[in-house]
Image (tube, rainbow, N blue to C red):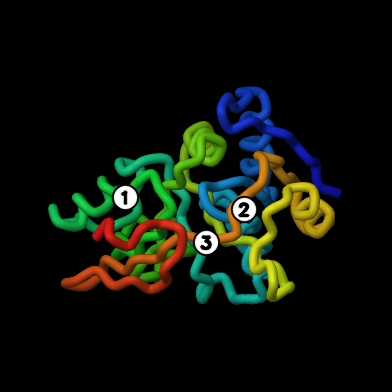
Amino acid sequence: MAEFLKIYEDKPSEAAIKKVVEVLKNGGLVIYPTDTVYGLGCDITNSRALEKLAKIKGVKLEKANFSFVCSSLSNISDYVKQIDTATFKILKRALPGAYTFILPGNNDLPKDFRKKKTVGIRVPDNRIAIQIVEMLGNPIVSTSIHDEDEVIEYSTDPELIFEKWQNQVDLVIDGGYGENIASTIIDLTGHEPIIVREGKGDVNVI
């Protein structure tokens, strides 16, 4: 059964963040708050954890469209090809924020993602998520938590999330109520930005 851990976003406890990082480093799956909906994630370097994440989502790992949750813009350059000035300006305006940007992947992607031509990058405006990634030292691979109930598409209450997911993950963070609007997805791989999904992030950022 998963551990249920309260962390306050305005002042995340270092000991609590350390506990989350230990779970991730040991190949665990963690549900954590972002600036949009709660995310389900694991350490980008742990193949076993990535396989578990893909299995939960019911997809093959090589076909999964997971996001890379990074701590900053400089963190992004480890995984994407060199970007032009116009693209960089968009990222600088928007991040951290409620966006997922699709960018061309580079040759240094972790082995489980080598075949991917593009990657989805997130830098959420949430202190808990950012501090976890910073302490971990590399991104979390993440997906949003969907709710089967069509009325509430995303779970927002951490206690209900825990109730539902406690036997599938290793740790659930209670970081307060989440949003029920997902991130805005913008594809920056072509000549012009393309809005793939309009979510919480303002599309006028491009």
Left or right: 143 as drawn, with respect to 193: right
Count the labels in the image: 3
* Residue 23 x/y as whole percent: 69, 40
> Residue type at mark 2?
Tyr
**Disc 1 target residue:** 94
Q: Name the residue rendered at 81%, 47% in the picture.
A: 2
Is disc 3 surrounded by few (<14), some (14 to 19) or many (20+) residues within 10 Å? many
Q: Where's the C terminus, which quadrant? A: bottom left
Amino acid of disc 3: Ala
Q: Nearer the viewer, residue 192 or 140?
A: 192
> Quick check: 28 above or below 135?
below
Question: Which residue is at a point 68% across and 51% down the rendered structure image?
Answer: 29
Q: Residue at x 31, y 60 (%)?
A: 107
The residue indicated by pointer 2 is: 38
Q: Choose top left, top right, bottom left or bottom right for residue 58.
A: bottom right
Pointer 2 or 1: first along the chain: 2
The residue that mark 3 highlights is 182
Question: What percent of the width, then of the height, locates residue 80?
Answer: 30, 57
